[in-house]
Amino acid sequence: MGQSVGHVQEEGGLTPGEFEDGRLLFAGVCEFFWASSAASNLPPESVPEFAFAGRSNVGKSSLLNALTGRKALARTSHTPGRTQQLNFFAIGGEPGSEKLRIVDMPGYGYAAVSKEKISTWTKLMKAYLRGRTTLSRVYVLVDGRHGLKDSDHEMMTLLDKSAQSYQVILTKKDEVKKRDVEEMVAKTLAGLQKHPAAFPDVIFTSSETGEGIAELRAAVLRRLSGRG
Ligand SMILES: Nc1nc2c(ncn2[C@@H]2O[C@H](COP(=O)(O)OP(=O)(O)O)[C@@H](O)[C@H]2O)c(=O)[nH]1
Ligand SMILES: [Mg+2]
């Protein structure tokens, strides 16, 4: 394993107990329960929400599958029509008694989409991000082969303005040469300096090998218990 990654992830100071609790948190119920296409039909606020955003094809569906250890989650997200909505999943308990919610946000930065559609999603995302008091953290997924793009900066600017806490997750680590990993992490952290609300650390993941997934679960658990 690359030393750099161990280093980056240890900076979070996650304990073995947090890794185990994180694993258990995602080992239970994981159920799709709500899709919102407009700010007027968001589910009532309840438990803390962890939203996942990123450019189309960044590996969001794969990461959510790896995180929850289930294939059904991505299948739900792939249901035609639902990809342009905010999809809500109950984690750790049946909807109504869940411990947290995962929110799958529409992918952005996809060129072949009409302006009208983009403006509809943008409105929905803005409304959700600005108004949601139970939103605990947004994870912005960035392709680890390519790094931050203009559309990621736009998304993060929106998050800065919304005063939402967010962290970047680099994806597809298995596709990045070991010697390039450290440089990609450094470049990404440098790019985050423009963004006051960004968590100053990244998690490098691979849904293919599972690397970084336990760390992500533990990070969610830590945030959920008010320690991160
Ligand atoms: N090698 C590799 N490929 C991945 C990984 N995650 C996703 N992919 C691939 O990237 C493409 C887009 O993945 P998907 O999860 O559908 O992305 P989404 O559009 O962000 O939901 C698919 O071909 C996946 O197989 C990963 O960790 N490693
Ligand atoms: Mg997807």
Image (cartoon, rainbow, N blue to C red):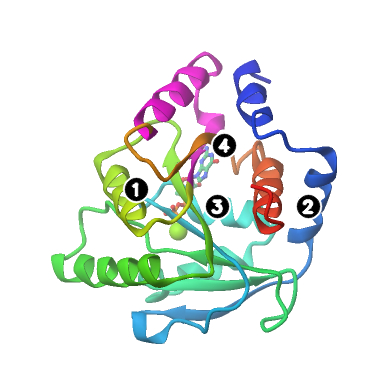
Q: Earlier in the sequence, mark 3 or mark 4?
A: 3
> Which residue lies under the disc numbered 3?
62
User: Ligand 1: does it lie within 8 Å of the C-beta at label 3?
Assistant: yes
Mark 2 and 3 residues: CB-CB less than 8 Å, in contact? Answer: no
Please name the residue shown 45% across and 33% down the image. 144
Mark 2, other Cα within 10 Å: few <14 / some 14–19 / many ≥20: many
User: Whole-percent x and y of residue 19?
Assistant: 78, 44
Q: Which residues are magenta?
A: 167-192
Question: Disc 2 marks which amino acid?
Answer: Arg
Mark 3–mark 4 Cα distance, whole angstroms, equals 15 Å
> Which residue lies under the disc numbered 1?
156
Quarter of the figure with residue 82:
bottom left
Question: Disc 1 marks which amino acid?
Answer: Met
Instruction: Decide if residue 182 is on the left or right side of residue 160.
Output: right
For discs 1 and 4, the disc positioned in front in the rendered view: 1
Mark 3, other Cα within 10 Å: few <14 / some 14–19 / many ≥20: some
User: Does 75 appear above or below 219?
Assistant: below
Mark 3–mark 1 Cα distance, whole angstroms, equals 22 Å
Mark 1–mark 4 Cα distance, whole angstroms, equals 16 Å
Q: Earlier in the sequence, mark 4 or mark 2?
A: 2
Mark 1, other Cα within 10 Å: few <14 / some 14–19 / many ≥20: many
Instruction: Decide if residue 137 is on the left or right side of residue 110.
Output: right
- Residue 23's disc is 2
178 falls in the magenta region: yes
Mark 2–mark 3 Cα distance, whole angstroms, equals 17 Å
Question: Disc 3 marks which amino acid?
Answer: Ser
User: Whole-percent x and y of residue 143?
Assistant: 42, 38
> Which residue lies under the disc numbered 4?
203
Mark 2 and 1 residues: CB-CB less than 8 Å, in contact? Answer: no
Q: Earlier in the sequence, mark 2 or mark 3?
A: 2
